[in-house]
Amino acid sequence: QVQLAESGGDSVQAGESLRLSCSNSGSAYVFCMAWFRQAPGKEREAVATIDSAGIIRYADAVKDRFTISKDRPQNLYLQMNNLKPEDTAIYYCARGRSAGCSFEARSFSYWGQGTQVTVSS
């Protein structure tokens, strides 16, 4: 059974950095992997995706600040630099249904429980 588990969320001040990790028991290298986030009162939104070939896409709001990556043990990472209060949300890792990626949450079949990131000014 595919299991995803996020870690690394914390409370930080604006301008600081965090690194999120997602342990993945499934086949990360043949499926799209992604980070989503959801702030209170807002819909879940894609932050970054990485497909089976390593092609990466970022949401405009995090471009040049966040970096998504994965490694051979099939862990997924999100390096978050220069955090802003607007980044405050629960962050989720997700695995898609195909090698390619989309920014649609409904395209993803497996989700972690989320990890809280809080950024104060």
Image (spheres, rainbow, N blue to C red):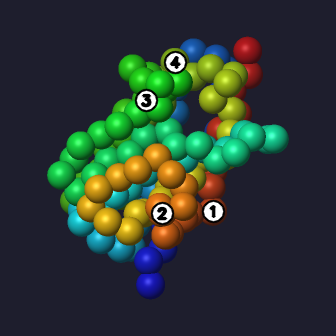
Q: Classify residue 6 by image quadrant.
A: bottom right
Q: Which residue is mark 2?
A: 108
User: Is 12 or 80 nearer to us in this picture?
Assistant: 80
Residue furthest to the right: 41
Q: Earlier in the sequence, mark 4 or mark 1?
A: 4
Q: Which residue is mark 1?
A: 113
Q: Horizontal and vertical percent for residue 83?
A: 57, 22
Q: Residue at x 47, y 32 (%)?
A: 59
User: Is 68 or 19 nearer to us in this picture?
Assistant: 68
Please name which of the two marks, 3 or 2, marks the residue nearer to the observer.
2
Q: CA distance from mark 3 to mark 2?
A: 21 Å
| Residues tagged 1 and 3 counted as in contact (Cβ below 8 A) | no
Q: Amino acid at mark 3?
A: Phe
Secondary structure category for the residue under label 1: loop
Q: Which residue is mark 3?
A: 66
Q: Amino acid at mark 2?
A: Phe
Decide: is 114 above or below 110.
above
